[in-house]
Amino acid sequence: MASFVPTSPETLEDQRLYTAARLTPVDCLDCRARVGVKKNSDHHTSVQWSTAAREHCPELSRRGSDPSGRGLQQGCSRLAASIEAAVRDGAVPVGAEDGY
């Protein structure tokens, strides 16, 4: 449970920028699960999984849920390849904008 719930407009905007801004939808080329992706650099990739995407991905389904209860996932190798292809094709921009 969160110990801090943002209420000020500035804090809510910061939260949006860190978690949702510049997310590009990417579909897995294998199972078609759709996630949000942001690449701040060649070595940094953020992936936001929706509940529907997690349930749709056979690789994540085979592994089961995170035992810590924190919702952390190791990732999906098929989706990683799909993201790499989207970056190569120019569908996912690389580079932070305004620090995000």
Image (cartoon, rainbow, N blue to C red):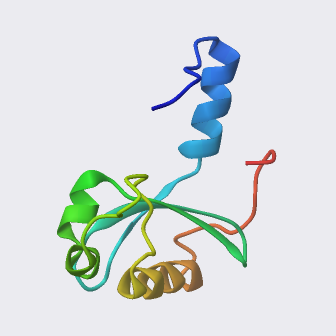
* Outermost residue, right side: 99
Q: From the viewer's perspective, is residue 25 above or below residue 18?
A: below
Q: Residue at x 49, y 86 (%)?
A: 85
**Foreground pick, 83 / 4:** 4
Q: In this view, does 53 lie above or below 69?
A: below
Residue 42 at x, y percent in the picture = 72, 78
* Residue pictured at 26% horizontal, 69% vertical: 33
The number of numbered badges drawn on the structure is 0
Q: On the picture, is 15 further left or further right than 83?
A: right
Left or right for 43, reference 4: right
Where does the image place residue 8, in percent across and percent down from the top left?
Answer: 64, 11
- Toward the front, the furthest residue is 68
In this rendering, the answer to whether 14 lies above or below 6 is below
The x and y percentages for residue 98 are 80, 45
Q: Residue furthest top?
A: 8
Q: Toward the viewer: 74 or 96?
A: 74
Q: Position of residue 89 (x, y in %)?
A: 53, 82
Q: Which image quadrant for residue 10?
A: top right
Q: Quadrant of the N terminus?
A: top left
At horizontal 45% and vertical 88% (from top left) the residue drawn is: 81
Q: Where, by quadrant of the figure, is residue 26 drawn?
A: bottom left
- Residue 46 occupies quadrant: bottom right
